[in-house]
Image (cartoon, rainbow, N blue to C red):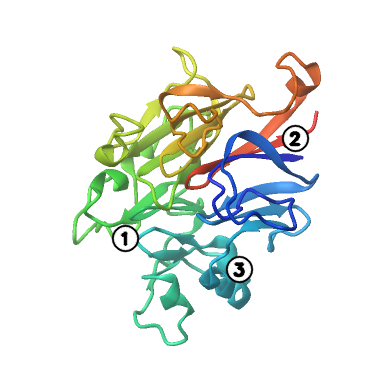
């Protein structure tokens, strides 16, 4: 499999091949192959580094690039399971979901607090919530629940700073449904094309996305914070049409700080938003696109090449200001 990447590379987070890293690396402005590994499974982007996991080792990343903060290194060595699953918002709040060594989600005010042997604040816990997916946005979190007797279908829960209600996308009440406690988003229940199967957001962003089993994409977020690159973002989840009047079926979605990319079921990549660092792969001359635009990989082949047409895109991922695509061989 081949990993393609584009966008910000200030910390060499897109450079997997060089032994000697550039002190002042250039950003990458088109989707370029940066790594080949037949067992590549998924990508985990952070602001200053990138991890690539393979099916050979599901706990420890096989490949890494960029500058890993000391606090992240400490968490990785102190508790590998916590490190594998944690999400951190840009307001420093951190959530550890349930995993094999952690029975239920716990929340800390900061990573420093988690690593402190005598925490200053008692962590919050959510025993009734079982999480299958967790994603941070700038001031909070969204989580996809695991089906249970109390929630037969997966539900999207949101919680975070009450000063940003559009990101929560649900009614709040200090007593029955506080903003700081995970609660389901009503508009993502009983959807026409089935339950939500994928969620995405960026730890420093204000746009959130959810994908249904029937390949419909829903987005919502803070309109004023997203206005420069995604005008009129709804404050409640609404379906999005991409690529045609009827809209293409969406297979995957990834949200960055100020950009979003999607994979369609017919093997196309589309995106919109900021491209000032090349995060959409549209070249140096395009700084922004406020319309959905088809994106292409720099495969070095003609668009009509039959072998390239047979290659399948496995998935898409987004960092704050970069994007990643895994391509399966023909």
Whichever of labels 1 and 2 marks the residue nearer the N terminus, that label is 1
Distance from Cα at disc 2 to Cα at disc 3: 28 Å
68 relative position to 187: left or right: right
Residue 33 location, quadrant:
top right
Q: Residue at x 49, y 22 (%)?
A: 293
Residue 328: numbered disc = 2
Give above or below for 77 relative to 204: below
Distance from Cα at disc 1 to Cα at disc 2: 40 Å
232 relative position to 304: left or right: left
Label 2 crowd (10 A; few <14 / some 14-19 / many >=20)? some
Q: Position of residue 207 (x, y in %)?
A: 37, 41
Q: Residue at x 47, y 34 (%)?
A: 275
According to the image, label 3 marks what residue?
Answer: 81
Most foreground residue, 280 or 148: 280
Report the mark closest to the observer, 3 or 1. Answer: 3
Camera sees residue 153: no
Residue 181: numbered disc = 1
Camera sees residue 44: yes
Q: Position of residue 296 (x, y in %)?
A: 61, 25
């Amino acid at each position: 499999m081949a990993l393609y990447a584009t966008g910000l590379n200030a910390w060499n987070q897109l450079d997997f091949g060089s032994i000697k890293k550039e002190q002042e690396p250039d950003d990458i402005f088109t989707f370029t192959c940066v790594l080949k590994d037949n067992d590549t499974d998924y990508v985990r982007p952070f602001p200053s580094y990138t991890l690539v996991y393979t099916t050979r080792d599901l706990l420890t990343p096989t490949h890494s690039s960029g500058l890993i903060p000391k606090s992240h290194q400490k968490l990785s060595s102190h508790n590998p399971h916590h490190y594998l699953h944690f999400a951190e918002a840009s307001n420093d709040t951190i959530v550890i979901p349930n995993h094999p060594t952690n029975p239920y989600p716990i929340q800390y005010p900061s990573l420093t607090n988690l690593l402190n042997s005598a925490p200053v604040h008692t962590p919050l816990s959510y025993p009734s919530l079982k999480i299958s997916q967790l994603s941070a946005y700038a001031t909070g979190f969204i989580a996809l629940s695991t089906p249970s007797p109390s929630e037969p279908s997966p539900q999207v829960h949101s919680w975070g700073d009450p000063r940003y209600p559009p990101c929560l996308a649900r009614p709040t009440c200090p007593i029955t449904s506080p903003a700081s406690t995970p609660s389901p988003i009503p508009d993502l229940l009983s959807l026409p094309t089935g339950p939500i199967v994928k969620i995405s957001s960026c730890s420093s962003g204000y746009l959130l996305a959810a994908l249904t089993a029937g390949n419909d994409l829903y987005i919502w977020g803070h309109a004023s914070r997203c206005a420069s690159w995604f005008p009129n973002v709804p404050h409640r989840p609404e379906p999005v049409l991409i690529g045609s009047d009827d809209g293409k079926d969406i297979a995957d979605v990834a949200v960055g700080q100020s950009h979003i990319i999607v994979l369609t079921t017919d093997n196309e990549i589309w995106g919109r938003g900021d491209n000032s660092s090349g995060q959409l792969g549209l070249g140096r001359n395009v700084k922004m696109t406020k319309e959905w635009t088809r994106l292409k990989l720099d495969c070095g082949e003609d668009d009509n090449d039959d072998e390239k047409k047979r290659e399948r895109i496995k998935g898409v991922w987004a960092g704050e200001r970069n994007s990643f695509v895994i391509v399966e061989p023909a």
